[in-house]
Image: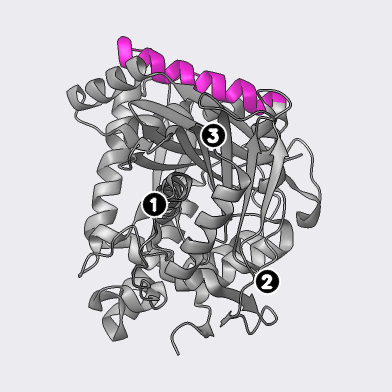
């Protein structure tokens, strides 16, 4: 039975890290206007859990024999009173630092709501999903589905049963023929050799650890920011004019901001880890409604000097990503993910990369769900594991950009991250309006 099976290599990593220090689980945060209450959300989750077979799974076994097994408990939902405006961010930090009890269930939720509910009430619904069964795109699609059911429950509309979605096989079985057999082994070998060569040649640097503690004592911190619709629109337009992508501009801004913190020197060698959505690269294409982990990494390497311009770096990121896509690096990356993770563990007091940007772009889900309105949606992930790594999780919804910057404490302090994020945003805002100065140490 496909629902009960062993975890593939990349899924194993997600469970190992979940058990070690609650890292890498996907957290979706939505701000919802309207009288959303616990009873409505509870009923909607019960419907969703019947629609997605993997939500009825749990993970059992020791780390050498991890497997999915049907028999999950009902999705847990807790309610937190919104005592002040920032209460949801405090709750988010709790979620980022709390292990999923995967032997029982693979999703949990928190509803942060006002004591008195009304039409103008604003609630935050935060859902945390095990990364072994999902990625950001499918998690956001699940969130939209959940709000659709909330709307039907609230209006008393009968919910017509829909057929259960099929449980998909693990990601390595969904990849194209070029990843399998002798040809696949050659491609994986070439991928590893290229990556090793570039790391040896460039020796990219990350932030130095401000304080070192064992893996199990590390915690996730977070910085949250928004770009308003006007600046977001200007940035998108400027990227087109400069013949690059928003992803390229985001990477350039984060690299510039991080490079300043790395230390002095005329030249700096940096790298950027970029998660890529595999869905549109598969045949047949797999929709976002299917809950499965379908992300593979592409890594770009760059040399900064005093003459490196912002847009030059942004175009370089785009070019390297395009080369990686044509070569199929994202497929090799997901197949070799566990090996790369094990290598990172041998250097646990060094940043595995300089920066990482997970940008899912414009979120194509509705804003209005009956009497409820989704005014904001964003995502983040626990990152206690990897000290010194600077990450950004980016979502664009209704024209605005929402950004989370989770980081490993105490390797990076809250003050350091706040300063770095402010610098990152300054680069983005300047880039959207005028020509900015080359990077300088």
Q: Tell me the SS state at disc 3.
A: loop
The numbered mark at residue 157 is 1
Image spot of residue 213 (x, y percent): 81, 48
Q: Is residue 13 magenta?
A: no
Q: Separation of disc 1 and disc 3 at Cα? A: 16 Å
**Viewed as shown, does residue 367 lie left or right of 268?**
left
Name the residue carrying label 2. Answer: 104
Q: Which residues, given as a range, are shown in magenta?
A: 415-441
Q: Tell me the SS state at disc 2.
A: loop
Image spot of residue 10 (x, y percent): 50, 69
Between discs 1 and 3, the one toward the N terminus: 3
Name the residue carrying label 3. Answer: 35
In the image, residue 228 above or below residue 326: above
In the image, residue 407 above or below residue 48: above
- Give the camera-side residue of 383 and 185: 383
Front of the two marks 2 and 3: 3
Between discs 2 and 1, the one toward the N terminus: 2
Q: Is residue 429 magenta?
A: yes
**Quick one: which residue is furthest to the top in this view?**
434
**Viewed as shown, does residue 284 lie left or right of 200?**
left
């Amino acid at each position: 039975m496909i629902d009960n099976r062993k975890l593939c290599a990349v899924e194993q990593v997600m469970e190992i890290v979940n058990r070690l220090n609650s890292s890498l689980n996907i957290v979706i945060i939505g701000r919802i206007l309207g009288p959303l209450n616990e009873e409505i959300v509870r009923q909607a989750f019960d419907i969703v859990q019947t629609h997605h077979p993997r939500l009825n799974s749990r993970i059992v076994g020791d780390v050498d024999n991890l497997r999915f097994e049907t028999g999950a408990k009902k999705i847990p939902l807790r309610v937190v009173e919104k005592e002040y405006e920032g209460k949801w961010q405090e709750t988010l930090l709790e979620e980022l630092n709390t292990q999923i009890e995967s032997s029982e269930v693979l999703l949990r939720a928190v509803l942060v709501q006002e004591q008195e509910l009304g039409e103008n009430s604003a609630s935050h619904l935060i859902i945390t999903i095990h990364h072994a069964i999902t990625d950001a795109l499918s998690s956001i699609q699940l969130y939209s589905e959940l709000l659709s059911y909330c709307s039907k429950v609230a209006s008393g509309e009968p919910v017509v049963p829909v057929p259960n979605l099929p449980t998909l096989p693990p990601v390595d079985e969904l990849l194209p023929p070029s990843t399998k057999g002798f040809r696949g082994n050659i491609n994986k070998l070439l991928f590893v050799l290229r990556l090793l060569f570039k790391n040896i040649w460039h020796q990219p640097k990350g932030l130095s650890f401000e304080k070192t503690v064992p893996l199990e004592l590390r915690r996730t911190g977070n910085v949250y920011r928004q770009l308003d619709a006007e600046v977001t629109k200007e940035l998108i337009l400027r990227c087109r004019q400069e013949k690059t992508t928003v992803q390229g501009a985001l990477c350039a801004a984060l690299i510039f901001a991080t490079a300043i913190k790395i230390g002095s020197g005329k030249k700096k060698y940096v790298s950027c880890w970029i998660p890529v959505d595999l869905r549109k690269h598969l045949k047949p294409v797999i929709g976002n409604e299917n809950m499965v982990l379908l992300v593979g990494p592409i890594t770009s390497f760059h040399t900064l000097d005093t003459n490196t311009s912002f847009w030059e770096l942004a175009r370089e990121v785009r070019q390297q990503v395009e080369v990686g896509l044509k070569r199929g690096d994202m497929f090799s990356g997901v197949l070799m993910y566990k090996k790369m993770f094990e290598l990172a563990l041998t250097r646990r007091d060094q940043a595995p990369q300089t920066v990482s940007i997970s940008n899912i772009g414009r979120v194509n889900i509705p804003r209005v769900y009956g009497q409820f309105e989704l005014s904001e949606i964003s995502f983040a992930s626990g990152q206690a594991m990897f000290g010194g790594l600077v990450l950004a999780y980016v979502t664009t919804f209704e024209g605005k950009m929402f950004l989370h910057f989770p980081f490993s404490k105490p390797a990076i302090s809250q003050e350091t991250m706040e300063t770095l994020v402010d610098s990152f945003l300054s680069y983005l805002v300047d880039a959207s309006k005028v020509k900015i100065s080359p990077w300088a140490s």
